[in-house]
Amino acid sequence: MAEECVIGVDLGGTKLLAGVLGEDLAVHSRTYRRIQGLDQRALLEAIVETVEEVRASAPGPVAAVGFGIPCLIDQRRGMATMAVNLPLVDVPFRDVMAERLGLPVQVDNDGNVAALAEQRAGAARGASDAILLTIGTGIGGGIVIDGRVYAGSFGAGAELGHMVIDMHGPRCQGNCPNYGCLEVMASGTALTREGLRIASERPDSGLGRALAEGRLVTGALITELAHDGDQAAIDTLALIGSNLGVGIASLLNVFNPDVVVVGGGVIAAGELLLAPARAEAARRGLPPDVAHARIVPAHFGTEAGMIGAAALALDDVRSRGAA
């Protein structure tokens, strides 16, 4: 008899990743789609099309679908109430997707499901208290307390990217009304912004020459040049890492976790990002918290959200089976 499967969907600010996973969270197949610039209707249609595409490749019957989306979620109603980087406002996401797909659907914030993946089978496996920061277009977050994902009173908690680390900092991006959030200071978007600034200030650097040659200054280019030894690129990553460390210090002081896991696309920089973050957190954190917690790269990389969304769906299937 064919293995029953679930589908995990990670919806980001610019991309959509969906995969078919088994009960052991092994990925059978996956599909990727760009979604940048879509309005709400087109976005929902793209999600349904992508899920149906990957569903067709499943080795067995699909029992449920889990979604991780970068949005405030009202868990009582399965409502996507507000997204900073996507056109999702007051959308009954769980019910809409269940109706269109004809499958049970679970939905949570993308940071929460990524944290679930890392705590179940990744870099935080075995930790009872863990925090995840996912650094991409924006910054998502997830908190695990005593082995369970913390969601707040109705599911909108753990928006760690919107913790203010500089009240006089730049205006945050998207629909966020604040200034100096961790997201605007330490995300992939911030890395590109600071890379452009440093490239223009240091035209003789590798980063400066790349800008003069008309190359697009992106996080990937900055990371590549930094790994090749370009000091301007290294300094750009160190600045973003230090900003990240300011936020991590506050999280250590408030939650006293066993581990802080850093994931998302920017983690491709590795220790060029994490070493400055650890150093800044050590300077600012209270000694018991800093001495106790590990700050480590994510195990699952960019697939953490997809895997965690699948784990969410599996939990739903198991709870219905036990009822």
Image (cartoon, rainbow, N blue to C red):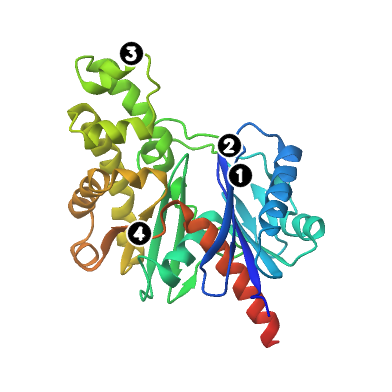
Look at the image and tell me whether residue 238 can be seen.
yes
For the residues marked 4 and 2, what is the alpha-carbon distance in whole angstroms? 26 Å
For the residues marked 1 and 3, what is the alpha-carbon distance in whole angstroms? 36 Å
- Of the numbered discs in the image, which one, if any, rests on residue 83? 1
Please name whichever residue, 221 or 30, is drawn nearer the observer in this view of the structure: 30
- Of the numbered discs in the image, which one, if any, rests on residue 213? 3
Three-letter code for the amino acid on which mark 1 is drawn: Ala
Sequence-earlier tag: 3 or 4: 3
Q: In screen coordinates, is 322 left or right of 122?
A: right
Sequence-earlier tag: 4 or 2: 2
For the residues marked 4 and 1, what is the alpha-carbon distance in whole angstroms? 23 Å
Mark 4 or 1: in front is 4
**What residue lies at 39% left-to-right and 52% top-to-bottom?**
263
Q: Are marks 2 and 1 in contact (CB under 8 Å)?
A: yes
Look at the image and tell me whether residue 151 can be seen.
no
Please name whichever residue, 44 or 73, is drawn nearer the observer in this view of the structure: 44
Quarter the N terminus occupies: bottom right
Looking at the rendering, which quadrant does residue 131 occupy? bottom left
> Could you classify mark 2 by the number of other residues whose Cα lies within 10 Å: few (under 14), some (14-19), or many (20 or more)?
few
